[in-house]
Amino acid sequence: MDSYEHNRQAWNAFAASGGMWSTPVSPEEIARARGGDWSVLLTPTKPVPAAWFGADVAGQPGSAGPSGSLRGKDVLGLASGGGQQCPIFAAAGARVTSFDASDVQLSLDRAVAEREGLALRTVQGNMKDLSAFADASFDLVFNPCSVSFVDAVEPVWREVARVLRPGGVLLSGLTNPWFYLFDVPRFDAGELAIVHRLPVSIEADGMVEFSHTIDTLIGGQLRAGLALVDLFEDEWDAWAALKGIAPAFIATRAIKR
């Protein structure tokens, strides 16, 4: 079984169990998003700055606040199923497509859309192949931490650049490659034991993850024709072994040139 199919099935099982990345947003959150009060996550804990959804999305002016800047825009949630970010974007007025490997993650997006009367399209597939979409189809691609589940990340960035319009924005969450130096069972027990040479693939929680490199994670965006304009780092209390040592996540904002 290849890593794509392995991870598709693993994510289906995870989503069916109701994990934290598969807990749909509430009616109250949708109601607030309709009124312009919303936030979303690219990384585990730190909300994406509202300015990252600003007026330069596809080079078009937007009204004040994140809701106004997305209204009428075409948004692709890339490996962003789970009933969380994509329904929020739809409630904020965007035209949203949710693309994910996991059938169950997509079903959660559809369930929220049906519950709330939102227009939201779902497409199942491999993020390395966005051939379901024409060139220059989207103003914004939103990609929360997920590229660690594909064996090669540069094809993802090339496809993202192809489907973005000029001036369109990619927001991506990344796991810092150095995290994958550690032995997973000992890490989960609170011990930092370096056992791997990078880049590496590991199995964690039944899923195959790939460390990639800074060269392919960030340099790959640049080579695909995306200009990096901002980033921030994030921590996660669930990874107690790293508490106070170093943030293991990076969020990037890049614009198609």
Image (cartoon, helix red, strand yellow):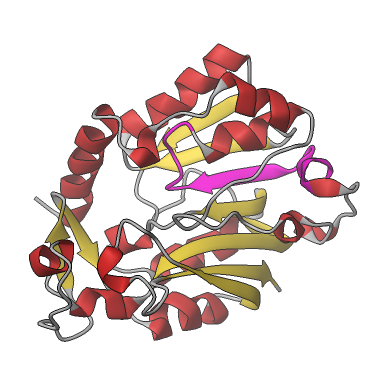
> Based on the displayed image, in which of its 4 quarters is residue 47 positioned?
bottom right
Residue 257 in the figure: left or right of residue 252: right
Residue 232 in the figure: left or right of residue 210: right
The correct choice, above or below, for 15 with respect to 212 in the image is above
Q: Which residues are magenta?
A: 66-83
Coordinates of residue 226 in the picture (x, y in percent): 61, 74
Numbered-mark total: 0
Q: Nearer the viewer, residue 233 or 53?
A: 233
The correct choice, above or below, for 76 with respect to 87 in the image is below
| Quadrant of the rendering where the C terminus is positioned | bottom right
Coordinates of residue 82 in the picture (x, y in percent): 42, 35
Q: Nearer the viewer, residue 44 or 206?
A: 44
Coordinates of residue 190 in the picture (x, y in percent): 17, 67
Q: Identify the residue shown where x is 47% and y is 58%.
A: 43
The correct choice, above or below, for 255 with respect to 123 in the image is below
Q: Identify the residue shown where x is 57% and y is 69%.
A: 252
Coordinates of residue 33 in the picture (x, y in percent): 70, 32
Q: Nearer the viewer, residue 194 or 120?
A: 194
Q: Check the image and name the residue furthest to the front.
A: 244
Q: Nearer the viewer, residue 204 or 223?
A: 204
Q: Identify the residue shown where x is 65% and y is 37%.
A: 89
Magenta residue check for 16: no
Magenta residue check for 73: yes
